[in-house]
Every structure is written in structure tokens, then in C-alpha cells.
Image (tube, helix red, strand yellow):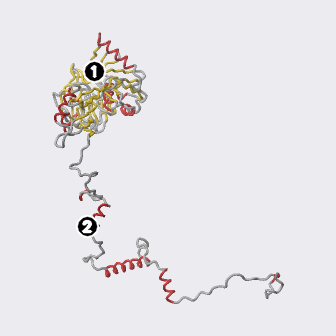
Amino acid sequence: MFLYGDQGNDQAGGTATISFGRAPVVLPTPTGAERLRARIDRIDWAPDLGSRIGSSEWWRGAATCTALIAATCLLSPGFHRPITGSVAPAYSGSEWDEARAQSIAPLAWGAGTGRHMGANDLARPLAQTPERPMIELSVMFGQGDSFVRALQRAGVSATDSSRAAGLIAGAIDLNAIRPGTRIDMTLGRRANRNVARPLDQLAFRARFDLNLSLARSGDALAMARHPIAIDTTPLRIQGMAGSSLYRSARAAGVPAKAVEAYIKAVASRVSVGAVGAGDTFDIIIEQARAATGEVQLGTLMFAGLDQGRRNTQLVRWDDGQWFDAKGQTERQGFMGMPVSGRITSGFGLRMHPLLHYMRMHKGIDFGAPWGSPIYAAVDGVVKVAGRSAGYGNLVKLDHGNGISSGYGHMSRILVRPGQHVSRGQQIGAVGSTGMSTGPHLHWEVWKNGVAVNPRSFSFASVAVLSGEKLRAFKARVAALMAVRPGGR
């Protein structure tokens, strides 16, 4: 216990102040050299030369860089004098053999790596490398290829190639083998290296419904057929026409060629341009499904279009002609439009855009981009194909029975006089030749030399099936209507 006055001083409030810890250390005064060294340490001698360009720090860094480059050049022995370094002595004798045994030599050296054993009862050198007892390979049948040439290219002897081709020819036509067909083969052991390997086995897809294989039995080859089960239920696809009948059908899974055939068939009965977004298309296509999983789609069999008030159903008959579900075929005189575009001027009196007075407009104008294809509205013979006054470049077709049609203001003409053209065949391209204010097609139709309204004029030839053909046709229609969407 401390008593009052033991600390030698009296503090206010009766409390004494006591100091604990080490005594403060007094640092020596730095010399001038030490102050200079510390100042130099604080200087950044190598600043970033990409920033603060032109400042004092930048110039200091540039001076440092220049000084280092100059010092390097002064201390270097010269660019023309190589610097001699220490090179390890090359191995020789037993040292080289030991290093080689532990390394992987490149093929350029012969690849003779590893320790070699001397010939004894357990290891004897071979006169030649033994061959594999058999080789399994595949060859692709190419465009314009022949069966014999494909086998010989794979290493099959001429004798075996001819025998195999003779056996295969007894099952299928060798010329019917499709390019890209893969032929799998197994080549057996040969007597020596100077002869071709024998053909032991061969297999390939000869047709969509048939696999063929060859196997060696002694010195002869035997062929075996392997039929593949095929389901020929047609594929039926239905959907809404939407904003574009073509794109909607393609989005539903209809192949492009089938969509083109469908539109062409439907256009013979209805105007494709009048198809609404709510109309329903119905398409049936030939389909073959193999048990192995492959699917082949064929030609269009049925083309249907439900427009509410009108339901069009067309069935392809054996000769490729389209008949409606009642067994009638009708060749319409004209398609909906001979060009893809919009009607800019109809048939009748109008104010002529260039002459500026009322004048009879004897046809229909279709506005379309320059170069758009123009198609023949119906079969005919080209009577005029060239320049014709205000019509510009004109093509005139004669359809018989006093009926003809004209296509004016073309930019290009693709037919010649006397040529027979089919409905849907391109005969020219949209232009603005003659008396025209812009690219469009002027379409006229004449009956006995008198212009008629193309939209209200039509002619048709009707053919009706009867007897046995009609009964067979109705049976086909019933079978097609029984197909469920999806072809299942």
C-alpha cells in the first residue's frame, strides 16, 4: 500500500501520476547523404509514358528510358558479334545409347528407341511385320461410280469384285444404287503381300426397303436378302394460312417442293391472293417410313383449302392431273394473278396518268418491284414478243377459240414468237417501258379481238371420270380422307 507522499509529489484531487513503459528514444539526426538517398528513393524514375504526356514526370521517364537504351548500346559487344555461351558436350558411345534408350526419337531418325534385346530363344527378329488377319472398312458410292470400281478402290481383287457385282445385279439394278450409299466390307487374310485380300463379307442398303449382304463360304460368295418393313401411310399436315400461305405451310413442316406444288394446284381453282389469314390448308404427301427409322417423302397427293364459304379439295390422279373430290377436273383459263403484286388500276374508264383525260383502261395494272417474274396465265402460243408502241415491251399469247392475252411494260422478254408456253411459265419481268409512270404489269385479255375484264372473264375445260376409273378414284379419296394429321 502506498502512503501519502510516497511518490514525492502531490497532485490535485489527491491523485498521483505514475509513468510506466520505456523511456522515449531520441533518433539521430540524418546526414546529408542519407537525406539525399531518401529523396532519390521517393522519385519515380520510370513513370508511365502513356499518361501525363509533357509533364515533368513524363520527361524524367523519357530521359531514364533514353539513358538505359544508350547504356545498353555502349555496353553491348556489337550486333555483328555473337555472344559465346556454354554448350554441353555431345553424347557419344555408351552415353548416347543410354540417352537414346530413355527418349522418344522422331520418325525421321527411324524411331529406334528403347533398349533392344539380343536374339535368343525368347526373342527372334522377324523377317517382316505380320499383317492383320482381317480388315474392316467402308467405301462410299460416288456420283457416276460403278459397283466394281468402288470395290476395287477399297482393295478387293478384280475376281471378287466381278463375282460380287454379278450377285448384286441379280437382286437390283446396279445403276440404281444411289450416290452416297455406304458399302461395309470385311477383307480376309491373303496368302502373300503380292495379291489382293479376299472379300469375306459385304453389306449395304440396296433400296429403301432392302438390305443386301454377301458372305464367303469356302471359295464362293453367297448373297442374302434382308427386307425392311415399310409403312406407306401418307403424311397429312393441316394449319392456318396466316399472313403467308407459303411460309405457314413451311413452318408446319411441309417440304418446299410440296408447298410449291400445292400452291400451283390450288391456284388453278381459286385466287391465291384472296386466301385469308383464317383459311385452313390441308396437305397430304406420299410418305414411306422404314422400320430402321428412315423417312422418305414423295409427291403431293391431296391439296385442300377451306375458306369457310368454299372448300376446295383436289386429288392427284395417276396421270398427274388434279381432280376435285367428285372426280371432275377443270382447267381454269387464268390463275389468280400473273404476277405477285397489288392491283393499282382496274378495268374501265379512268383518268390517264400521262394524257390527263378520261380514257378506257382495257386491262388491269399490277404494281410490283422492278424485275419481278411475270407468268403465263394459261397455256398458249406466243404471237408477239417485242416492242409495241405505248405497251412498251409486250408479249401476246394466243390461247385458241378467239381468246388471247397481253402482258405489257416488261423490262425483259424471255420468250420468242411461235413458242408454246405452259401455264405458270415465266415469260418476262416487270418493267416500265412504253407509256408508263413506274414499274408495273399491264395485263389485257381479248375475246374475238374485243378487250374484256380479266377479273370477270374465265373459261374452262372440264373432264369427268367415269366407270371403273371413277370407282378407283373415289376409293383413293376415301383412303386419303381417313388419314389423320401427322400420318399416324
Q: CA distance from mark 1 to mark 2?
A: 91 Å
Quadrant of the drawing holding the C terminus: top left
Contact flag, marks 1 and 2 (Cβ < 8 Å):
no
Q: Amino acid at mark 1?
A: Gln
Q: Amino acid at mark 2?
A: Gly
Residue 68 in the image, given as x and y percentages of width and height: 37, 79
Q: Residues within 10 Å of mark 1 (few under 14, many from 20)?
A: few
Q: Looking at the image, which is closer to me, 310 or 297? A: 297
Where residue 200 sits, quadrant-wise, is top left
Q: Is residue 411 left or right of residue 346?
A: left
- Residue at 67% x, 85% y is 23
Q: Residues within 10 Å of mark 2 (few under 14, many from 20)?
A: few
**Which residue carries the number 2 mark?**
93
Quadrant of the drawing holding the N terminus: bottom right
Q: Is residue 186 above or below residue 88?
A: above
Residue projecting furthest to the right? 4
Kindly report which numbered mark, 1 or 2, lies closer to the viewer in this rendering.
2
Q: Looking at the image, which is closer to me, 236 or 384? A: 236
Q: Secondary structure at mark 1?
A: loop
Residue 328 in the image, given as x and y percentages of width and height: 31, 16
Image disc number at residue 187: none
Q: Is residue 2 above or below residue 457?
A: below
Q: How many marks?
A: 2
Residue 308 in the image, given as x and y percentages of width and height: 43, 22
Marked residue nearer the N-terminal end (1 or 2) = 2
Q: Is residue 288 left or right of residue 130?
A: right
Where residue 482 sits, quadrant-wise, is top left
**Which residue carries the number 1 mark?**
321
